[in-house]
């Protein structure tokens, strides 16, 4: 019934807002010069001069014209909101959470409309596709990339199983770097904020051959920001960033028909762990939130007498590193207009070397450490597309995709004696090796037809084949096993779009997403290694995109419903002599529905309001499973990172002062009650909260120099970014960042 009501409300709202009567009574200004009441077919796809351009459908389209729910975060917005890495994107994307992995700061775990997971298991693919310049990231390792030298980040909400590549049941995150302009320019930025956080970013670009070859060099360095104090050492040692890197970009345009863009990037990250602290309550506690289970005494309290719950922003780590991650990448984008057809090619190579030393229990005792955990990834991908670029009513796109990835993991576990029946002070060490490899192939295509000047339809499909293998040595005495399995799926999408006016459209979309299966590589015996099945998501979406008052006011509304099947969940078991064992299992399914409202209003030339408001309802199908804390009926559990209500409002006011200007920015972000993992324990519950950010910026003419004073979480609101009972062994919490404030200066030449 709730699902039916959600879709009904969405449909009624769309019909009301888009009806001709309301359009006429809205008091909008006359259309801009040259616009007609009915927009011709080819003009309908063209963006307005001031509109953000997105490539959600592998073509350049205006954000207000593309029939997909997509958020485009520009470089200026990233800087103004002080978004340094992907895990800070939650504040600007409706119905989305971007979180750091529980123990590994270089890994980001996106949840889009509740679809995502908190696994760091390399045998498992991502459920939300992340790409840089069209090159897909095959694994979570090294995914929490810095936002330096970024032109725009597009977050597509909803499955993208046709054009955006593999494993996109929840959505896609497309990162576009800044291409060389072909002119001599340079820009530098430096910022300093609370907790000794320092950012240095800059680039220089120049023509190498006028109008033919241009180069761009960019670099960044970020240090400091640790806000959690170690009660043993007295030092602030977790929660910050220590990373540096650079990119070189070459743009080759020998003619108007051919473009080649080559980038090579390198980064090194030795950041400390997130701000994790132990929350080992000494006995059973009452759950303050409806639906949460009271937590019994953690085993670390009974066995090791580690019963302390440390205060917010403190920790008792006995091990915080060293951690090292190196990312290297190459991307070559080619576009060639060969007369009515454009040939596009995206060739990519990504390499990640990640070494982490992790104190999983976050206590002073030797209970469960990983010393070290090494991950090595090598991935090559090739995508080739042919697309029409003519003026007829038909347009089409066909392509093929190939991916080859090789992953090696070595994990050494160091366990305290009581976990395997020995006294405190005795330790057990075990090393596990595994190599999950993937060869993936796909053929895809999309066909669009302009039925009338106002109405068009498109259909598309993708056939995917995944060949998976795993070589695993679970323990020193287990021997080595080789496992192989093939997966395949056909996914499709169909969209129809109708324009009531040049600035108002309604669309209906059906889309499927596919996430490949794999092997449970974390098993501690060869007999325990099993394969898990692929996921599939059928999504139905209805949307309105509209502009009013001479395009000063934008109002967008989206309603959606998901039928999500065989979703891959993380379960945690306790194994004597091994510690915690993470398993990947398939649940029957999940239903999700929601409404998203987005708006932007240029009240005057100097005053702008933007905002979004989202409602999300999720419900597991009834199924008894042990997710690490005893058997529960999933129908009684909340979906992790799926708050019912999220919202953001931002105001920007510019005050001209001679040739300069003063810009004031302020925003508020709200999240309702959120469960931070799928096991409904007290430690996993975060009550509703709101965060307030602000910036004051002084701009010299042409933005040659900008000086800013900024603050985040200005009310110093405490909130948890993560909470987990870890199978009853120990309780962990990650504290969200407290109030920060700082200064920033940018200079352009």
Image (cartoon, rainbow, N blue to C red):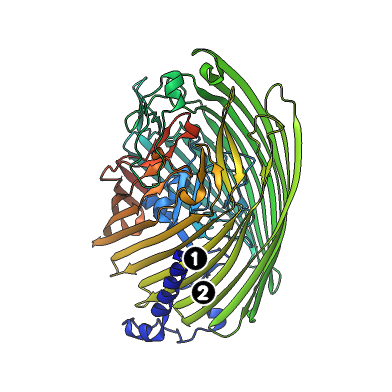
Q: Which residue is mark 1?
A: 560
Q: Which residue is mark 2?
A: 507
Place of residue 662 in the rendered image (x, y in percent of width and height, measured from the top left): 26, 57
Q: Is residue 104 left or right of residue 235?
A: right
Q: Residues within 10 Å of mark 1 (few under 14, many from 20)?
A: many
> Of residues 206 and 521, which is closer to you in this image?
521
Q: Is residue 647 left or right of residue 401?
A: left
> Of residues 148 and 454, which is closer to you in this image?
454
Place of residue 150 in the rendered image (x, y in percent of width and height, measured from the top left): 49, 52
Q: Earlier in the sequence, mark 2 or mark 1?
A: 2
- Residue 385 appears in the figure: no
Disc 1 is placed on an element classified as strand
- Residue 349 appears in the figure: yes
Q: Is 347 above or below relative to 425?
A: below
Place of residue 549 in the rendered image (x, y in percent of width and height, measured from the top left): 34, 77
Q: Image point 27% across, 45% down: which residue?
A: 714
């Amino acid at each position: 019934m709730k699902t039916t009501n959600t879709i009904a409300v969405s449909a009624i709202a769309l019909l009301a807002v888009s009806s001709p009567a309301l359009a006429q009574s809205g008091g909008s200004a006359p259309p801009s010069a040259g616009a007609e009441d009915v927009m011709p077919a080819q003009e309908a796809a063209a963006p307005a001069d001031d509109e953000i351009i997105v490539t959600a459908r592998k073509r350049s389209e205006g954000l207000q014209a593309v029939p997909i729910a997509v958020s485009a975060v520009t470089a200026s917005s990233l800087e103004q909101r002080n978004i340094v890495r992907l895990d800070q994107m939650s504040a600007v994307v409706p119905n989305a959470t971007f979180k750091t992995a529980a123990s590994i700061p270089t890994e980001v775990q996106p949840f889009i409309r509740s679809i995502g997971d908190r696994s760091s298991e390399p045998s498992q693919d991502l459920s939300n596709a992340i790409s840089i310049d069209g090159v897909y990231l095959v694994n979570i390792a090294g995914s929490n990339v810095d936002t330096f030298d970024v032109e725009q980040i597009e977050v597509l909400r909803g499955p993208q199983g046709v054009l955006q590549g593999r494993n996109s049941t929840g959505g896609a995150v497309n990162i576009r770097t800044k291409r060389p302009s072909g002119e001599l320019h340079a820009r530098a930025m430096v910022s300093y904020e609370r907790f000794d956080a320092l950012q240095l970013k800059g680039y220089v670009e120049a023509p190498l051959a006028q109008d033919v070859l241009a180069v761009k060099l960019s670099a960044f360095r970020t240090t400091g920001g640790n806000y959690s104090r170690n009660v043993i050492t007295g030092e602030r040692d977790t929660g910050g960033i220590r990373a540096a890197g650079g990119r070189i970009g070459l743009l080759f345009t020998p003619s108007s028909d051919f473009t080649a863009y080559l980038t090579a990037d390198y980064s090194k990250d030795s950041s400390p762990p997130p701000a994790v602290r132990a929350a080992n309550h000494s006995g059973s506690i009452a759950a303050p939130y409806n639906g949460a289970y009271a937590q019994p005494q953690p085993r670390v309290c009974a066995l090791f007498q580690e019963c302390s719950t440390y205060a917010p922003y403190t920790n008792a780590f006995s091990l915080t590193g060293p951690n090292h991650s190196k990312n290297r990448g190459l991307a070559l984008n080619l576009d060639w207009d060969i007369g009515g057809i454009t040939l596009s090619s995206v060739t990519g190579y990504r390499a990640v070397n990640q070494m982490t030393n992790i104190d999983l229990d976050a206590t002073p005792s030797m209970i469960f450490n990983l010393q070290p955990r090494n991950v090595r990834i090598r991935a090559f991908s090739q995508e080739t597309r042919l697309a029409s670029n003519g003026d007829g009513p038909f347009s089409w796109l066909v392509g093929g995709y190939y991916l080859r990835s090789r992953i090696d993991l070595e994990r050494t576990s160091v366990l305290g004696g009581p976990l395997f029946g020995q006294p405190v002070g005795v330790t057990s060490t075990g090393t596990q090796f595994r190599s999950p490899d993937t060869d993936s192939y796909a053929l895809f295509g999309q066909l669009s037809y302009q039925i009338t000047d106002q109405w068009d339809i498109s259909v598309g499909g993708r056939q995917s084949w995944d060949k998976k293998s795993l070589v695993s040595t679970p323990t020193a005495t287990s021997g080595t096993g080789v496992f192989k399995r093939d997966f395949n799926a056909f996914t499709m999408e169909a969209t129809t779009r109708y324009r009531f006016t040049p600035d108002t459209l309604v669309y209906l979309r059906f889309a499927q997403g596919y996430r490949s299966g794999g092997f449970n590589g974390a098993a501690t015996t060869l007999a325990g290694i099993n394969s898990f099945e692929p996921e599939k998501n059928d999504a139905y979406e209805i949307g309105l995109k509209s502009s009013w008052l001479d395009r000063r006011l934008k109002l967008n509304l989206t309603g959606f419903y998901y039928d999500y099947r065989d979703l891959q969940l993380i379960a945690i078991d306790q194994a004597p002599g091994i510690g915690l064992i993470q398993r990947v299992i398939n649940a029957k399914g999940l239903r999700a529905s929601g409404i998203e409202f987005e708006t932007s209003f240029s009240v005057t030339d100097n005053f702008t309001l933007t905002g979004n408001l989202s409602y999300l309802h999720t419900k597991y199908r009834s199924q008894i499973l042990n997710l690490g804390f005893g058997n529960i009926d999933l129908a009684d559990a909340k979906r992790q990172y799926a708050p019912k209500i999220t919202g953001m409002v931002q105001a920007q006011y510019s005050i001209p002062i001679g040739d300069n200007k003063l810009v004031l920015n302020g925003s508020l972000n709200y999240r309702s009650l959120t469960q931070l993992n799928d096991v409904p324990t007290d430690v996993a519950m975060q009550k509703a909260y709101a965060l307030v950010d602000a910036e004051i910026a002084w701009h010299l003419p042409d933005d040659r120099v900008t000086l800013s004073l900024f603050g985040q979480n200005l009310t110093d609101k405490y909130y948890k970014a993560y909470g987990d009972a870890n199978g009853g062994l120990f309780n962990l919490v990650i504290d969200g960042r407290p109030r920060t404030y700082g200064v920033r200066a940018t200079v352009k030449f």
